[in-house]
Image (cartoon, grey):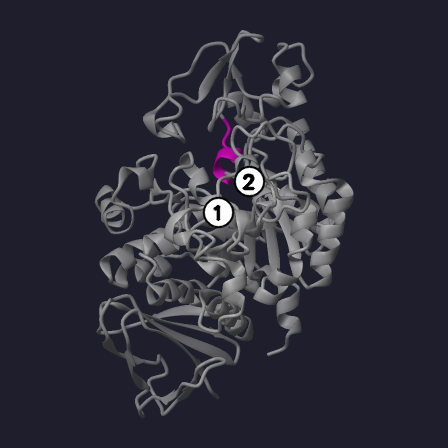
Amino acid sequence: MRITDTSDLWWKNAVVYCLDVKRFADSDGDGWGDFRGLAGKVDYLADLGVTCLWLMPFYPSPMGDDGYDISDYYAIHPRLGTFGDFVEFVRTAKDRGMRVIADLVPNHTSVEHPWFQSARQGPGSPHHDWYVWSDEEPEVAPGDVAFPGEETSIWQYDESCGRYFLHRFYRFQPDLNVSNPAVRDEVAKIAGFWSSLGLSGFRLDAVPAFLETTDDTARARLPDPHDLLRDLRSYLTRRHGESMLLGEVNLPHDQQRLYFGSDGAPELSTCFDFIAMQNLWLSLARQEASPLAHALESRPMIPPDAQWGIFVRNHDELTLDRLTPGERQEVFAAFGPSKSMQIYDRGLRRRAPTMLGGDPERIRLVYSLLFSLPGTPVLFYGEEIGMGENLGAEQRLAVRTPMQWTAGRNGGFSSAAPADLVSKVVRGSFSPRNVNVDDQRSDPESLHSFMRALIRAYRECPELGWGVPTILRCEQPSVLAHRCTWEEQSTLALHNLADRPVTARVTLPEGRGPVRLVEPLGRTEVSTDRKGMLEVRLPRYGRLWLRVQA
């Protein structure tokens, strides 16, 4: 295996770390994190083993949706720094071996964006057709509303214009009209602008909503909305060959396959696997491997240069919308029984360590699964130390709290008065006093040390990102046994989802042996029998990676 085989398509075995600049590190004591503060933490992220930083929106915004309501795509929020600070951060990250991608939010703008302020002047405005309008309020199906309880419609009447505008999300986020060629050109221009400043790609927000057209006129102008993704990917590849697109596509696997591209015309480089994530939590709730195993087996074949994005939870609610109502209630009962922990009747607003009751072995099991499942692992900031949530915060902001660096004031995030912080610091058993970077970096038994070793093991086994996965039959229902093979390398992973020890027996597909297997970067060494059968004892929430030796 040559390392050059993995360098061009870097996203296939990257370690992606999502962070919010304004909540990561504050350099000037104003209570908001900034790019100078982030640049000062680059060595920490490099030491952890991160290879790609994903930045949540850092653009000017009235902050109605925590920055996803953007008022200027070509600028930086003044509290986060200057273009000089941004470029210095990107340069420093690249110097330490990390690429940087950022959120691109092309589905909607803020109502305060100059485009919309122009558009609301009426059909005579040059930007009016940049948004989606209707003279009458169209009927809305219940499933069309993204945030039940907060919005009742996806159409909002604008007094200035005298027409209704479409907003698939909040009423202060009018949808852009992607059937307008000028809008598509502008989206490409925005991507090209930030790529020229050093970004290696983008995470595309709400991709299915972005591509959806609303009427016959729009469909006539853009018969195949996927042309937009194909054109954007091609444009970025021409500008910067290393560019990637990471897509938020929360759809069933058979529909999701379309977003990777077809007929040799690539679209998204990577798609988040929401189906596997949701079934992971269902498996944990049941202590049975079958839901997750079936989800992995249902994955369609994707192009060889594409990848699945694997995650435990992301920066939004932990959505369970692809489970049945009964399955969703199982997960709620196990990991978020209180209504205050739930959101939109479909998800949870908790972080993994609190959902797992702070059980160290169960937490390690979940992240061992994350890094062993076929795909590219994506971490949300603070997961490496087991940060918790603030249920006193509104809606999805519960999990977007300041990074916890030390046990001191404000968790070392900022020297500002607590009342001036962008968000309140977590309190209780998961507060900075008990959960912080400083204490864990010096403790070889900490979650941080475990995650650092786990990332190193993952990087030593490129077949986990590049390989073809196989679910192996195991008579223990609580054990997920799977194998990833690429060229001459193969890794087998065993995970016991039960709170009791079990003996797991699996047979390698070759059906012959003995085969010697060694734990990557570990001390365990075992062999199969002559028929390729392996027997191992796994403790409660036990986990074991084994690399097949030639």
Numbered label tally: 2
Quote the CA–CA distance across marks 2 and 1: 9 Å
Q: Is residue 92 visible?
A: yes
Numbered tag placed on residue 258 in the rendering = 1
Question: Magenta residues?
Answer: 207-213
Residue 228: x, y in percent?
Answer: 60, 38
Q: Is residue 254 above or below residue 173?
A: below
Amino acid bearing label 2: His
Pointer 2 and pointer 1: residues touching (CB < 8 Å)?
yes
Magenta portion: prevailing SS class: helix
Which residue appears at 52% of the width and 53% of the height? 404
Residue 11: x, y in percent?
Answer: 59, 59
Amino acid bearing label 1: Leu
Is 440 magenta? The answer is no
Q: Is residue 197 visible?
A: no
Residue labelled with disc 2: 226
